[in-house]
Image (spheres, grey):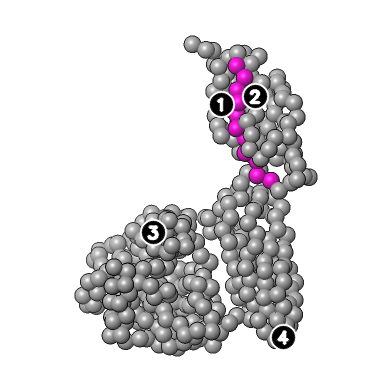
Amino acid sequence: MKRLVIMMSIVAWGVLQAAELYQCPEAPVIDGIEDPCWSQAEAFPLVDWKDGSPLHMKTVARIMRDNQSLYVFMHCREVNLVEARDQEKFNRHDAPIWNSNCVEFFFDVRNDGRAFYQFVVDIHNDAADLLHDDPESPSNAIDWNGFWRHAVGTYADGWTVEIAIPWSTLKMLTGQPVRLGMNISRPRRVAPFERGSLAPGEGGLCDFSQFLVFDNFSLEESELTADVLSSKVFLGSNRMTLRMRNHTAHNLVGQLELTGTASDHREVLRMAVPLEMKANEERDVSVDYRIDESGQVMLTAGFIHDKERCFLAQADYIFRQPLEFNDPHLLVFAGEDHPVYVRIFSDAPSWTVDVEILDHLGERCAKTDTLSPPANAFLVLPTRQLAPGAYTVRILLKHGNNLSKNTMPLKVIPRP
């Protein structure tokens, strides 16, 4: 079946007219505002996704590229803008925004008739990214995350979407002819209901045989590339290590920029350090940084050179509290000690744990001996002598020069 799909795609692509992808002299600012450079890019009107008829609400895409990224600017006409914006606002990444007023971008870069990328931006600038049917990706397509930028704007009778996707996010190879299959969809969830598509047809939005094809260009190798070597991260102080390569015959002088973006789009880290790479040099570069709040953070490394900023690499990390419990609401029978399972996330070579039990006045009424457990261990709470009532458990973790405090409620009840 896989061979049949590939053959069908090749035949259909041979019939489709390949479009030309405009190479822009300068990158646009991704802010949802149409910069002058967009006027030179060809306009691609979306049509009804099944029969190719004109849309009630005109939607036009302009597409261009440079050696770093692919850029798309969308004009979405909308006469019911207030109603369109009065939809659920998720304010988080990878929410199911494809069921709302949004624009979806589909990319086939592997020509295998199976794997494709999907990027989605809704009218509130919430975003989602997915990688479908790729054996190297997570089993759940939405678990994949890639670095890209997006912005939404409004105008008199509609709204705009502007995106920039680095070629490295799409895993496009340099120095080889590029074959990029692309489709765009705009589902409109207010009357009159309709769905526009860049490449219409009965096969559906994700039918590769219907994708518009750009195959008239190749990508030059970037001056500087980097691979992320860091794997473990911790709340607090960290170090990101990058294996960097200067592919040019001259020195590169600039700044290595590191940014961190939380899952709710907040920037939790931004820093830059001087960087000089000698001609044809390859070496590991480390940057010390600090994250002070738990959660999922995307770390992005870039290089600022001659006032130009280029994307190098990105990695998704989960920053955990240094100490977590298996049971955050303890319920204990009077006359019994109680074990609690503790997980410790720290890069310190050693640590100690002190456990205290406080009464309702905040006075300490029980304490364990100082412990040095492994990273995951059971700790026994000294609750045997406690009378029925409400208490607070306080656990102090000393790791390196840091002191982390965690508390949780404890309720002692009589045994029935």
Please say whether residue 64 is one of the residues in the magenta stretch.
no
The residues tagged by marks 3 and 2 sit, at their Cα atoms, a distance apart of 46 Å
For numbered disc 2, what is the local secondary structure?
Answer: strand
Q: Residue 388: in sight, yes or no?
A: no
Q: Is residue 222 left or right of residue 237?
A: left
Q: Height in image: 150 above or below 367? A: below
Q: Position of residue 355 (x, y in %)?
A: 69, 29
For numbered disc 4, what is the local secondary structure?
Answer: loop
Q: Residue at x 42, y 81 (%)?
A: 179
Q: Residue at x 70, y 35 (%)?
A: 373
Indicate which disc residue 330 carries: 1
Q: Height in image: 17 above or below 325? A: below
The residues tagged by marks 1 and 4 sit, at their Cα atoms, a distance apart of 63 Å
Give amino acid for label 1: Leu
Q: Which residue is mark 4?
A: 250
Disc 3 residue crowd, few under 14, some 14–19, many 20+, Cα 10 Å: many
Q: Nearer the viewer, mark 3 or mark 2?
A: 2
Is the Cβ of the residue at disc 1 closer than 8 Å to that at disc 2? yes
Give amino acid for label 3: Ile
Residue range of the region highlighted in magenta in the rendering? 336-346
Q: Earlier in the sequence, mark 1 or mark 2?
A: 1
Q: Which residue is mark 2?
A: 381
Q: Nearer the viewer, mark 3 or mark 1?
A: 1
Q: Which residue is mark 3?
A: 97
